[in-house]
Image: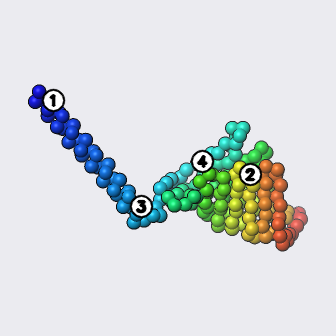
Amino acid sequence: MKRLVSLSIIAIAALIFWGSKIWENKQVINTLESSDPHYINVFIRDFTITAMDENGQPAYILKANKLEHYNDNEYAVIEAPVIELTQGEHHWMISARSGEIDDTNQRITLLGEVILQQQNKPQPIRLETEQLEIDTRQQTAKSTQTVNITQQKFNLQSTGMILNNASGKLELLNSVKGNYVQIR
């Protein structure tokens, strides 16, 4: 009987201690939220996200050094992102210094030294710009900034462009200039 009473007292003390710790943790979280309404609620280092299309094939693969999502934002900030954008035979490798991905994973904005390199082509195209908006569902990439385009013998410059990876079309929007150099 003494043993049962002792065990009951220990169990009650443990429950009280556990309950007070949970209450303290909730108080700390509430205090943190009220003192700093802008805080990181998700943090990931060296990660890979593979998003599948409706046929179960990879639509895009996102790799980055770091992802930070703040509680009061509808997007996450990514550091040194590399994106493989694939659609059938159309395949691009895209990199940048930083970027943002929205909470639906539909829009990715890349910033700083953005490079798009066409893959699986004998004469690949390379595009360079400072800003790029990617719609992952539509498989499109758009920029309103200056875009430098190179492919073996020629180089172009345009203000703005739209890449439709689904159709394989690249549209240059404004002030297009170019040079064609014959290599001997």
Quarter of the image for residue 67 reads bottom right
Residue at image point 75% right, 46% down: 87
Marks 2 and 1 in Cβ contact (< 8 Å) = no
Marks 2 and 4 in Cβ contact (< 8 Å) = no
Q: Position of residue 37 (x, y in %)?
A: 45, 64
Mark 4 vs mark 3: in front: 3
Q: Position of residue 101 (x, y in %)?
A: 61, 57
Determine whether, in the image, residue 164 is placed left or right of residue 48.
right
Mark 2 neighbour class, 10 Å CA radius: few under 14, some 14 to 19, many 20 or more = some
SS of the residue under disc 1: helix
Q: Is residue 37 visible?
A: yes
Callout 2 amino acid: Gln
Mark 2 vs mark 3: in front: 3
Residue at image point 30% right, 53% down: 24
Image label count: 4
Mark 4 neighbour class, 10 Å CA radius: few under 14, some 14 to 19, many 20 or more = few
Q: CA distance from mark 1 to mark 3?
A: 43 Å
Q: CA distance from mark 2 to mark 4?
A: 16 Å
Determine whether, in the image, residue 61 is placed left or right of residue 89.
left
Q: Earlier in the sequence, mark 4 or mark 3?
A: 3
Q: Which mark is residue 4?
A: 1
**Above or below, comparing residue 40 to residue 55 in the picture:** below
Q: Earlier in the sequence, mark 1 or mark 4?
A: 1
Query: What residue does disc 3 label?
Result: 33
Depth check: give the residue in front, 124 or 32.
32
